[in-house]
Amino acid sequence: MWDGVATGLATVLVPMNLLMVVAGCVAGTLIGMLPGLGPISAIALMIPITYGFDPSSGMILMAGVYYGAIFGGSTSSILINAPGVAGTVATSFDGYPLARAGQAGKALAVAAVASFAGGTIAAMLLMVAAPALATVSLSFQSPDYLMLMILGLMAVSTFASRGKVVQALIATVIGLMLSTVGTDPSAGVQRFTFGSLDLVDGLSFLLLAMATFALSEALMTVLKGDKAGAEAEAASRGNFGSLKLDREDARQMTPVVGRSSVLGFLVGVLPGAGATIASFLAYGMERALAPLREKNRFGKGSIRGIAAPETANNAACTGSFVPLLTLGIPGSGTTAVMLGALISYGVQPGPQLFQTNPEVFWSVIISMYLGNVVLLMLNLPLIPYIAKLLILPRQLLVPFILFFSLIGVYLVSFNTFDILLMTAFAVAAIFLRFFDYPMAPLILGFILGDMIEDNLQRTMTLYDGSISFLWQRPVSLGISILILFVILVPIVRAFRPGTGARPG
Amino acid sequence: MKPRVVPVAPLVLFVVFAAYGYEATQIVVFPGQELEPFKPRTMPVALAVAGLLFAAIRMLQVFRQGEDARIDWRAYDWTRAALMCMAMLGYGLLFVPLGFVAATTLFLLTGFLVLGERRRSVLLILPLAFTLVFWALMTQLLDLYLAPGLWWPAAGN
């Protein structure tokens, strides 16, 4: 492991890659602060910029953007009660009341320190867990991978889209269907191209990610007529109070950070769970564990109430890299976009990545740690200035977001057909969003589509069209049982009296 | 009287999945491939079946819960969103004939106007200045090709 750490350090600690960490964190914070634009959009917007980079630099930038976007989301949660990212909704429960009480600086400092601690502890856990899992997964065969990918899709549909499971499953199917457009890789047959040369190579992942996230989110802002509110204007004036934390704050935060880091990391490793669920679980856990006097402060500006979700969401972000780096299977929409980026750099994530591209593997892990340092040392003191972004006029901001999304895709393909196709997909995405169809399963389905078909073909060929691999291979059998569990959980929840949940 | 529920989205998706399924059955299978356990149309057909099944389940859910009818369509600014979509389509169509600089300036100007920007100084300076800086960065610094335009005599194509 220490050889790997040394490799990672040697890759990251060059001026260019250090610049990537800083640039990624700052850019991610700026984009993450804008309500409506989350880490997926932030990363998608960065992909065209990183096309010419070597894979390590590209991934270092993306990891920085990921962290920065989560931190930026926390900032808008605390300052204006408008979480830019779902994973920071729980932060607003106590962060916003504390900011309203004139202690916005303290709330931001707690969030930054908790994020730093959560990310750091999780990065250490990742250093141990990722190589171990990569070694185990070397014994995986096509049927196991197939079942693992199906598990990822099912988990994202059921856990990450609670209350809209059927819509999430439909979105997954749409994503998988879109992945079948183009030339079939095994027989060379054209599928769903309708004779168009522009579709022969299939749809580009970047095009779909930009259209379904960046473009459709910007157009949703137009549809809703969002404007910067009075709270955003007040925040932009930068009267935050002190950013310092005292000994009592540190005493309260320490046990919370320890517990929430481990919880967040474990939740992040599970496919489909991610930062949002981790932050809510950690918040609930700390409220349950807090002494009565402190429990009453939850929802009114509790330090523990800010520290718990912030630690957990950063730890979960790190945890979500475990399945991506070791199995090549993304566990969330954000890591799905990163997987697409890795593939576009010519790097195939999976157990082999650990051996074939150790510098990518370890530099991502090390850059996560450095990203946390940058967020604490650089972004926190800059918040009063970055907060001015909250009042940027929407009528100027939206056309620029649309332009960067469109030109980003064009600069990769140099084909204006892609601009037209993106517009069509953005309109379709808005239609689906209106009816509560989540976009993350769609993009995950699209990215995994090719791999699923490839592994399905190999499995069917190996087992002569039989599904006996389900019980002949212990790993496949174990994963199948997990899939069954994932399917049964929402059904049981729906029929359990008193939960208020309903099927789908 | 309870408003009648129309499962708009599941119905549309059902039709899309049915069309996809029909197209999937038309995928060419080469001689000798018929007996293979996995053909180019295997996964698309399976996906179409899954899609139709889920869309049907969703339709039943909507009939039971009436969710598709709860959207207040009048609360949204459809005109501006539609105009922005048209601006994007126009940008795609005019990019090659007008060239990057003119098409981008026009797109940004249209976007600002559609979304309500009325300050003349902003409208006159920002789109062109931003486009020129971006163009210089891409073509001079990164050496990337950006369409110069077919309609200009000195485009140098």
Image: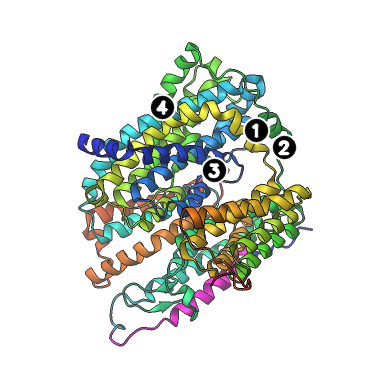
| Pointers 1 and 4 in contact (C-beta within 8 Å) | no
Q: Does the magenta stretch include residue B20?
A: yes
What's the magenta region? B9-32
Q: Residue A80 carries which label?
A: 1
| Pointers 2 and 4 in contact (C-beta within 8 Å) | no
Predominant SS along the magenta part: helix
Q: Name the residue under label 2.
A: A229
Q: Judge if badges 1 and 4 mark residues of a common chain.
A: yes
Query: Residue flagged by tag 4: what amino acid is it?
Result: Ala
> Would residue A193 be found to the left or right of residue A234 on screen?
left
| Pointers 3 and 2 in contact (C-beta within 8 Å) | no
Q: Can residue A305 be seen in this view?
A: no
Q: Judge if badges 3 and 2 mark residues of a common chain.
A: yes
Q: Name the residue under label 3.
A: A497
Q: Which chain carries label 1?
A: A
Q: Judge if badges 2 and 1 mark residues of a common chain.
A: yes
Picture coordinates of residue A319 (x, y %)?
37, 39
Regarding mark 4 in the picture, which secondary structure is present there?
Answer: helix
Sequence-first disc among 2 and 4 = 4
Q: Mark 4 points at which residue?
A: A117
Query: Residue flagged by tag 1: what amino acid is it?
Result: Ile
Q: Judge if badges 1 and 3 mark residues of a common chain.
A: yes
Sequence-first disc among 4 and 3 = 4
> Mark 2 to mark 4: distance in Å?
32 Å
Q: Which residue is drawn at 46% across and 26% down?
A: A377
Q: Is residue A461 above or below residue A381?
A: below
Q: How crowded is mark 4: few (under 14 residues within 10 Å), some or many (20 or more)?
A: many
Q: Mark 3 lies on which chain?
A: A
Q: Is residue A82 above or below residue A189?
A: above
> Mark 1 to mark 3: distance in Å?
37 Å
